[in-house]
Amino acid sequence: MHRIKSFLHNLKAYDLVVVVFFLFLSLLNIVYHERVEQWQSFILINSGIILFAFLLAYLEEKYNNRFVRIIHYWYIAPLILITFKELYFMIKPIRGEDFDHFFIAADRWMFGTDPTHFLHQFSFPLLTEILQIVYGMFYFLPIILALALLRKKRFIATDYAVFSVIYGFYLSYLGYFALPGIGPRFTIHNFDTINIELPGLWLTNFLREMINIGESIPAGTPNPAEVVQRDIFPSGHTMITLIVMYLSVKLKSRSKYFLLPVGALLIFSTVYLWYHYVIDLIGGLLMMMFSVWSGKIVFNWWQKRIGKEEFEYHKA
């Protein structure tokens, strides 16, 4: 028992989130094994990820090696994408129903129209190009914040930022399970003619295709609405971008001068480019507020449990 506790105490707060979430996914795979075709493979993968998190935490604590520390921080980045793809094989078989009708009704109740249609009248290729580029920068924004903090050797602030991002991502993934949806580019607009109806200049089509591939609908996919990732509510782009913007200000990072304007454009782009309904953005905002509030409590609870310094914005 003492040995188990010592291994647990090696975990950083963001490792704890990884371990708990992958245990949760493994439990879901077991409970719904008749619906999830590759459930056994996912349990093996999840177990490997959990063991890897424990191993990294142990190696950093034991040897305090700079190379191990770097890997310990950055293994979170590919892990977010791995988790995202595992959800692809789980959400539709487990849930079976999309809630786009609810999201469309909510937007029409608030605005009297579809916001994507309203914004389309103001669209032009240069704006579309800029917003598509900004939308594609989503995964880089947390990395920029983390690099800015590490450059100043603000390690507890970096720990907290990494924790806040992974905690936020996994909370948004729970939302995908609760209310699956595919978004207005399929339900309100014609997905097959987006490049014609909402054209950019040079990079837009390429970036759209990269995003489509990430959502398992490369060009030529028959019935893309049937197989696309269910990932719109809450808007993860909105939620995580707001968390990064908030932290950049609260942590007094100079990266805020880049993250704030780019983040604002990115959030606007989610509706302009037909990826999200406005209700998704509202959900992302509310989830961001819950994530920031509860995340600090969880982070400091774990820091106290393992005998490490608690986080306060003015000290980090």
Image (cartoon, grey):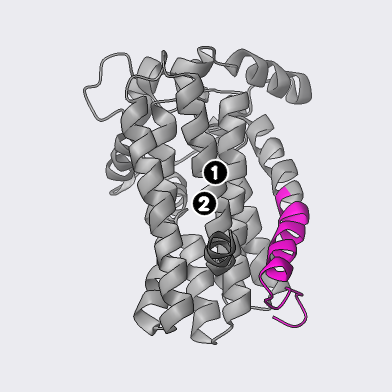
Residue drawn where x is 39% and y is 20% of the image: 36
What residue range appears in magenta? Answer: 291-316
Q: Is residue 230 magenta?
A: no
Percent x, y of residue 79 = 41, 51
- For label 1, the SS is helix
The quarter in which the N terminus is drawn is bottom right
Residue drawn where x is 34% and y is 28% of the image: 40
Residue nearest the observer in this picture, 265 or 3 = 3
Percent x, y of residue 206 = 27, 43
The quarter in which the C terminus is drawn is bottom right
Tag of residue 18: 2
Q: What's the distance in space between the residues labelled 1 and 2, CA to CA? A: 5 Å
Residue 99 appearing in the image: yes
Packing grade of label 1 (10 A; few <14, some 14-19, many >=20) is some
Residue nearest the observer in this picture, 103 or 148 = 148
Packing grade of label 2 (10 A; few <14, some 14-19, many >=20) is many
Q: In this view, does 45 lie above or below 75?
A: above
Q: Is residue 297 magenta?
A: yes
Percent x, y of residue 215 = 36, 33
Residue 266 appearing in the image: no
Residue type indicated by callout 1: Phe
Residue drawn where x is 56% and y is 61% of the image: 8
- For label 2, the SS is helix
Residue nearest the observer in this picture, 263 or 162 = 162
Q: Name the image quarter holding residue 153.
A: bottom right
Q: Is residue 167 above or below residue 192?
A: below
Tag of residue 21: 1
Residue type indicated by callout 2: Val
Percent x, y of residue 90 = 44, 25
- Asked if the residue under mark 2 is in contact with the one under mark 1, i.e. CB atoms within 8 Å, the reply is yes
Q: Name the image quarter holding residue 256.
A: bottom right
